Image (cartoon, rainbow, N blue to C red):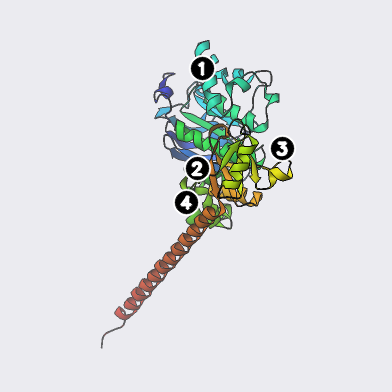
Amino acid sequence: MSETAIEETGPKAGATIELECLTKRYPGSPQPAVDNVSMEIKAGETVIFVGPSGCGKSTTLKMINRLIEPSGGRIRINGEDVTDMDPVKLRRKVGYAIQSAGLFPHMTVAQNIGLVPRMVGWPKARIKARVEELLDLVGLDPGEFRGRYPRQLSGGQQQRVGVARALAADPPVLLMDEPFGAVDPITRDHLQDELIRLQRELHKTIVFVTHDFDEAIKLGDRIAVLRERSHIAQFDTPEAILTNPADDFVSGFVGAGAALKRLNLTRVRDVEITDYPTVTVDDPLQDIFNRLRSGGTNEILLLDRRRRPYKWLRRGDLMRARGSLARAGTLVHDTVTRDATLRDALEAVLTDNAGRVAVTGRRGAYEGVVDMETLMNSVHELLEADRLDALEHQHELEETRAAQTHAEQEGEQEGVPKA
């Protein structure tokens, strides 16, 4: 196989992945860690491996780029068998992101991101341009971050750099092994939103391992629920798994509240985002006073110099704070992006306890507001859809039972001897 075979799809294109009877046995173990797994993943698809600890999901993932060598079976990327390919060359063509980012501490952000392009012989100018492009893509200012070291970054910033490094050589396939597992819940939500946005732009083939079923629902085009030794219990869309789990094992992963979990299937961009009165920290105080007095709302959103949500200001805030913006208003503690789920938005609204949440775009710039009424209408629509589905399912069961009873009665009549 040629070294360029996996690159033939070109920029921004994913590649198909086929696993055929993939198996991993470790010496001394009576059972294989991964047993005879076969699966087809479409180009540009995000597939999530979810299952209990020790079920083999990470082992299966690492066999795709042969960080762990298979004991048996085949791996094909875009139809090309990579099972016998030089594993180092393979790994340079498959992006890989892990928990805690795995950045080299002695390298700057730019050096970490440019590592693989440098190894494959890209010229310096192309590497520099790629670093700038990727930092912007993952929402980090190149001028501010390119020269920093990992220790100078927050956990969320490190993960963004880790994703940028995995994408540096523009691989068609991106493998992600619980990449957001070590950050706080709010940062994790924002990183998930960023990944969704990136995937809409780049169309890579992503295989993602998690133990969190809610994360799987939010991110996946399809979810593979894995039992012990990576046996596939169900491999389907999130909606199909939520509404029709294959068995009790899968139902255990779905858990209670399937209707509310479906809020993870609907994005903020799918509902009405309303405009809201805004001012900036550079506006004269008198103009801010006038906006609050003349506006049709009792509240206004103060934006910082980068047009990011900063504070909610109410009538009377400036008077009580003696006209100082430093002491006026309430800080904006949480925001959501258009790629956030309705569940994320609902949690943010309930946490803030004020009936609305600001929506932001690239680099946190303000784009609008989603309110509680909009979110609750969506919840009611989902619950009503579930109620109608349940009624339809019950009706189908009753029809099936009636047909079976009718068939049994006819069979009994036919068996009675005629006089």
Residue 148 image offset from top left, x and y in percent? 66, 20
Q: Does label 3 or label 2 sit earlier along the sequence?
A: 2
Residue 293 image offset from top left, x and y in percent? 60, 47
Up-down relation of residue 198 to residue 230 (above or below): above
Q: Does label 1 or label 2 sit earlier along the sequence?
A: 1
Q: Contact (CB < 8 A) between labels 3 and 4? A: no
Q: Nearer the viewer, residue 166 or 57?
A: 166
Question: From the viewer's perspective, is 413 left or right of 141?
Answer: left
Q: Nearer the viewer, residue 189 or 337?
A: 337
Q: Which residue is mark 4?
A: 239
Q: Which residue is mark 2?
A: 220
Q: Nearer the viewer, residue 35 or 135?
A: 135
Q: Does label 3 or label 4 sit earlier along the sequence?
A: 4
Q: Which residue is mark 3?
A: 324
Q: What whole-number distance in Å separates the C-alpha atoms at marks 1 and 4? A: 40 Å
Q: What whole-number distance in Å separates the C-alpha atoms at marks 1 and 2? A: 31 Å
Q: What whole-number distance in Å separates the C-alpha atoms at marks 2 and 4? A: 10 Å
